[in-house]
C-alpha cells in the first residue's frame, strides 16, 4: 500500500526551522518514517489555467514532499476567506467571527477541486489517501467525482462544534454531505465526534449506528483518534537543547528566578488575553511573586491578513505593555513577549527551563504544546502543567492543574499553586501524564488511523453495523 497524505501546511524537516501549528510538526516524523507522499501548499500562488499543477517535489526521509502552487485567483478566498474566516471561527465556537462571501466559498471549492486534480498525479494503483483538516472538507468528494475508488480518510485537527454553531457556516449542509465521500472521519475527542454525528442524525436525517453513517455515498465511519507526540524524541531534544545558545542565554538571564512559559500561535482561540490578565491578577494578589516568577510568552504571528488576527495582535501587545508598566521594575520585566517562531530543537529546551507550562486555550482540538511541555521535563525535577479544560489534551492529561480559561482568578490561583507545588506531587502528576503520552504516541495514532481506514473496506471487520 502506498499512502498519500494531504494538508494545507507542510513541514520540510530542516533542523531548527520554525514550525507553525501543531499539525505540520506532528506529521513530520511519521511521514519521514513511513515513506508516504505528503502533498500540501507551497505558500506561493500561480496564475493560469492550472491544468498542470506546479509542484516542487523533494525527498522527505523515506518518502517525499510535494509543495503545490495554488491558483492565484482563488488562494485568498480559500485560505484567508472561507477556511480561516468562516470554518476556523465556527469550529472554535466563535460564530460571532464568521465572515464568508459567496466568492470565498466558490474559491474554497475551486481549491479543493484543484487539489483533487493534482493528487491524481501522485496516485499509484494501491494508493490510499489521508486528508488532513478543515481546509479540505470537500476534497474526498472531488476525488470521487474524478473517479477515485480507493479508501479515503479524513482527520480533523480542530474541535467540531454543536449543531447550532456549525449551522452558522454558509453551505454547511452541502459541505457536510460532501464529507460523506470519506470512508473514515477521525476526530480528536468523543465530544467532537458526537457533535458531528448529532448533525448527521438530526439535520441530515441519516441513519447512524455504532459511528457508521449510511448515506447515498455509501458508508462512512466516524471515530476518535486523539493525536499524540513522540515523547522519547522530545525528551532527547530537550536534553540536547539545554546547550543551545538561546536556552543558555534565557537561563542566565533568569538569575534564579522561576519561569512560566506559554507558546501559541497568535490566535483568538488560544485565550492569550485571559492568560495575561491572570498573571496580572496573580502579581496583584501575591506581590511576593513579583521578581520570583516571570512569564515568557511566545506568540507566533499567523494569518495576519485577516482582520480578527490583526485586532488580536494589537490587543495583546497593549495588554502586555499595560501589565509590564504596572508591575515592572527598572531591572525586572514581568512578561517577555516574543512575536516569532522557534524550531522544536530550541522550544524543547525552553520548556525544560520553565517550572510552569501555561496552556489555556478557550477551545482547542488537542493542543500539542501541552504534551510537548510534559515530555520535555526533567524526570528528577519536573515542572507543572496548567491546562485549560477546553483543550482536547485535558481528556488525557487530567493530572495537570486543569483550569477554566474564562475564570481569571481561578487561573491566577492555579499558577500560584503550581509554583508552590512540592517535588513529590510534581513527580506524581508528571509520571501519570507521561504514562498517558507513552500510551498514545504519534506513531500509534498514525498506525491506528491507517488500520481503521483499511478496515473500512474489509468485509470481515466490524464496520458493518450489527
Ligand atoms: C492549526 C490548524 C492547522 C494549521 C495550523 C497553522 O493547527 O489545525 O491546519 O496548519 O493551525 O495555521 P496556518 O494557517 O498558519 O497554517
Image (spheres, rainbow, N blue to C red):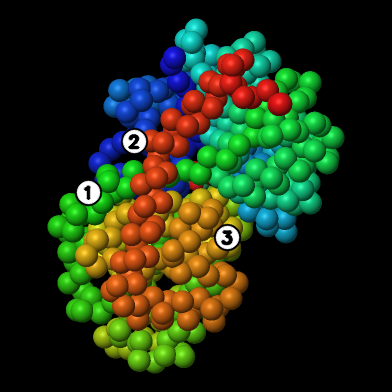
Q: Secondary structure at mark 1?
A: helix
Q: Residues within 10 Å of mark 3 (few under 14, many from 20)?
A: many
Query: Mark 1 and mark 3: span between their CA atoms?
Result: 29 Å
Residue under the image location 36 percent in, 68 percent down: 384
99 with respect to 68 (left or right)? right
Query: Mark 3 and mark 2: span between their CA atoms?
Result: 27 Å
Camera-side residue: 283 or 98?
A: 283
Q: Earlier in the sequence, mark 3 or mark 2?
A: 2
Residue 84, image x and y in percent?
Answer: 61, 46
Query: Mark 2 and mark 1: span between their CA atoms?
Result: 14 Å
Residue beneath disc 2: 29
Q: Secondary structure at mark 2?
A: helix
Q: Residues within 10 Å of mark 2 (few under 14, many from 20)?
A: some
Above or below — where is 27 with respect to 47? below
Above or below — where is 197 with respect to 252? above
Q: Residues within 10 Å of mark 1 (few under 14, many from 20)?
A: some
Above or below — where is 52 with respect to 388? above
Above or below — where is 324 with respect to 251? below
Residue at the left extreme? Answer: 243
Does the CB distance between marks 3 and 2 fall below 8 Å?
no
Residue 276, image x and y in percent?
Answer: 48, 74
Residue 182 seen in this snapshot: no
Q: Earlier in the sequence, mark 1 or mark 3?
A: 1
Camera-side residue: 26 or 71?
A: 26
Q: Which mark is residue 322?
A: none
Residue under the image location 37 percent in, 33 percent down: 30
Residue beneath disc 1: 236
Residue under the image location 15 percent in, 57 percent down: 243
Q: Earlier in the sequence, mark 2 or mark 1?
A: 2
Does the CB distance between marks 1 and 3 fall below 8 Å?
no
Quadrant assignment, res 279:
bottom left
Amino acid at each position: 500500500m502506498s499512502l498519500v497524505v494531504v494538508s494545507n501546511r507542510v513541514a520540510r524537516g530542516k533542523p531548527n526551522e520554525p514550525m507553525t501549528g501543531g499539525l505540520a510538526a506532528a506529521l513530520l516524523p511519521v511521514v519521514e518514517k513511513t515513506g508516504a507522499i505528503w502533498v500540501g501548499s507551497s505558500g506561493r500562488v500561480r496564475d493560469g489555467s492550472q491544468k498542470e499543477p506546479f509542484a516542487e517535489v523533494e525527498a522527505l526521509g523515506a518518502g517525499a514532499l510535494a509543495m503545490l502552487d495554488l491558483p492565484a485567483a482563488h488562494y485568498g478566498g480559500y485560505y484567508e476567506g472561507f477556511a480561516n474566516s468562516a470554518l476556523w471561527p465556527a469550529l472554535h465556537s466563535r460564530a460571532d467571527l464568521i465572515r464568508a462571501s459567496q466568492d470565498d466559498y466558490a474559491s474554497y471549492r475551486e481549491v479543493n477541486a484543484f487539489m483533487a486534480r493534482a493528487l491524481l498525479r501522485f496516485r499509484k494503483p494501491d494508493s490510499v489517501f489521508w486528508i488532513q483538516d478543515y481546509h479540505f472538507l470537500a476534497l474526498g468528494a472531488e476525488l470521487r467525482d474524478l473517479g477515485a475508488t480507493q479508501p479515503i480518510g479524513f482527520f480533523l485537527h480542530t474541535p467540531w462544534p454543536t449543531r447550532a454553531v456549525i449551522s452558522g457556516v454558509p453551505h454547511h449542509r452541502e459541505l457536510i454531505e460532501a464529507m460523506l465521500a470519506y470512508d473514515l472521519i477521525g476526530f480528536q475527542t468523543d465530544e467532537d465526534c458526537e457533535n458531528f454525528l448529532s448533525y448527521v442524525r438530526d439535520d441530515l436525517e441519516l441513519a447512524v449506528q455504532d459511528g457508521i453513517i449510511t448515506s447515498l455515498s455509501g458508508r462512512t465511519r466516524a471515530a476518535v483518534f486523539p493525536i499524540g507526540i513522540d515523547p522519547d524524541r522530545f525528551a532527547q531534544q530537550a536534553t540536547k537543547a539545554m546547550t543551545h545558545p538561546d536556552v543558555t542565554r534565557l537561563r542566565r538571564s533568569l538569575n534564579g528566578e522561576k519561569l512560566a512559559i506559554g507558546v501559541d500561535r497568535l490566535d483568538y482561540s488560544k485565550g492569550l488575553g485571559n492568560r495575561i490578565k491572570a498573571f496580572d491578577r496573580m502579581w496583584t494578589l501575591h506581590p511576593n511573586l513579583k521578581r520570583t516568577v516571570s512569564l515568557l510568552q511566545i506568540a507566533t504571528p499567523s494569518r495576519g491578513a485577516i482582520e480578527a488576527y490583526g485586532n488580536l495582535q494589537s490587543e495583546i501587545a497593549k495588554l502586555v505593555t499595560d501589565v509590564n508598566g504596572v508591575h515592572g521594575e527598572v531591572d525586572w520585566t514581568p512578561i517577555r513577549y516574543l512575536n516569532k517562531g522557534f524550531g522544536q530543537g530550541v522550544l524543547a529546551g525552553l520548556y525544560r527551563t520553565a517550572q510552569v507550562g501555561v496552556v489555556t486555550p478557550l477551545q482547542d482540538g488537542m493542543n500539542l504544546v501541552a504534551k510537548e511541555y510534559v515530555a520535555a521535563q526533567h524526570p528528577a525535577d519536573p515542572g507543572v502543567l496548567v491546562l485549560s479544560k477546553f483543550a482536547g489534551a485535558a481528556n488525557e492529561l487530567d493530572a495537570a492543574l486543569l483550569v477554566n480559561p474564562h475564570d481569571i482568578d481561578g487561573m491566577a490561583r492555579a499558577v500560584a499553586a503550581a509554583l508552590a507545588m512540592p517535588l513529590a506531587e510534581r513527580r506524581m502528576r508528571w509520571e501519570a501524564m507521561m504514562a498517558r503520552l507513552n500510551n498514545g504516541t504519534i506513531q500509534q495514532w498514525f498506525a491506528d488511523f491507517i488500520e481503521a481506514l483499511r478496515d473500512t473496506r474489509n468485509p470481515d471487520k466490524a464496520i458493518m453495523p450489527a
